[in-house]
Image (cartoon, grey):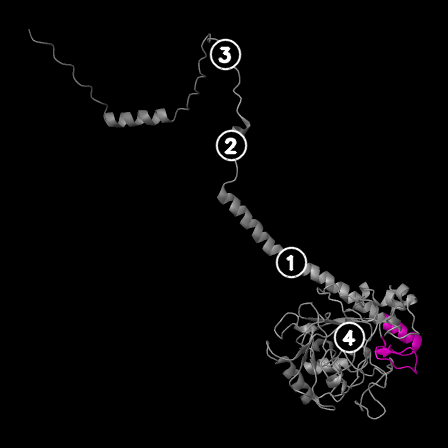
Amino acid sequence: MRPPPASPRPTPAPGLSYRRIAGRLSEGFSRLPPRPLAPPRTPASSPAPRETPVSTPHIVPAAHRRASRNGFTLIELLVVIAIIGVLIALLLPAVQSAREAARRAQCTNNLKQLALAVMNYESTNGVVPPHSMNPSVTTQTLLPMSWIPPLLQYTEAQPFFNALNFNVDLMGTGFGGWANSTVTTANLNILQCPSEDTWQPLRATGMNGTYYGMTNYMGNYGGPGVIATASGTIVPTKNFMMCPSSNCYYPGAKWGPVTIASIRDGTSNTGLISERLIGIGTSNFTRASAEARRGTFRSPQGVSYPSNAQGALTFVQACQSIPGSQGTRFGGGPGQMWAATFPIWLVITSYNHFGTPNQMNCTNPGEPASMDTNSPYAGYYVAPLGSAPPNSNHPGGVNVAFADGSVHFVKDSVAPQTWWALGTRAGGEVVSADQY
């Protein structure tokens, strides 16, 4: 018996194939929206959690606890230290600059007060206080009173003025003796620049080892003495030390007294008071040392009186060219006493417009006054023909109070001729503010 014939394979409809049918079915299913997933089935009952037996807590020793704490590694610690160091390096200059600005502002304020006191003195007495004063017009002394004590009555230091005895001399039992020692040994804030960083007071003789009070502020003695001696605003009157009976060392000098009317160059163009660093009282320094500006050098170039601008410029250049390890030097005493001064010497309470600001102090071997070469104080205090410029710890220049009461900062780079013009009261020079 024959087996039944196999069923014939279905034949797709015309125009369709199995592949086309499968593709259309797949396309249709892909267009259906997805069915949401059913939430997970929760069993009808869950076994109760097993109870964990309570055990006694394990006590960790304190040393182990400290050891297990997280801390800085050595590298992290070094990084933190380095960051702190960088911050300090960045901030320290700014802090120092701010402090110096405050000190300079206080210094400026002191100069303004002193300049105002000079104006008040001139209004009362008709003249600017002279560089040095004697107890009376008939008495000449070696160490007379300086221009500063009479001004104290117009400042916050008036009690010190009231305590002074102006009828005695400074030496021995005089002005600087025990009669005035309470005042003359005092260091007054108005006379000291906060930027000063060296205080080595000069021991006063004849006062039982006490010290004179010091000052950073100096009166303007004038332009180069080799051109016109005593041409400034705070200068001596003619006296026996300048012009003894047999000879006059400086026949063309512009001695005081000085009045406001005599400042014909204009009060706004004429220096009145400036500043100097306190002298160290020793010659243990060199031209290249940091203390060189506090002492005095003997210039290798001498200029006699009278001279001209070229001779004055040659002297200044010679003063600045002294080798760093050479040069005859003297300790000097700039600012070592505010109550007294020497009329024949600068530096103690005076400066002049010869060398520009912050240059060296130089004596002049061509000085006609025998004081500079024969005196036991030779070289210690620059004589009128030497160079005694102002100096300071302010970066780049010095403060100068002008005769109109204003205070300006004069740069170290000022031209010598401009600086000389600012020092004379009646030299006929014309100076504009942008020149210094």
Question: Magenta span covers which residues?
Answer: 117-145
Reading the chain from its start, which is encountered first: label 3 or label 2?
A: 3
Real-space Cα distance between discs 4 and 2? 69 Å
Q: Residue 53 carries which label?
A: 3
What's the residue type where badge 3 is placed? Pro
Residue ID for mark 1: 94
Residue ID for mark 4: 348
Horizontal side of residue 73 vs 379, given as left or right: left
Instruction: Specify whether residue 16 is in view.
Output: no
Horizontal side of residue 67 vs 372, given as left or right: left
Residue 113 drawn at (x, y percent): 83, 67
Quadrant holding the N terminus: top left
- State the SS at label 2: helix
Residue 178 drawn at (x, y percent): 88, 68
- State the SS at label 4: loop
Reading the chain from its start, which is encountered first: label 2 or label 1?
A: 2
Q: Callout 3: few (<14), some (14-19), or many (20+) C-alpha neighbours within 10 Å?
A: few
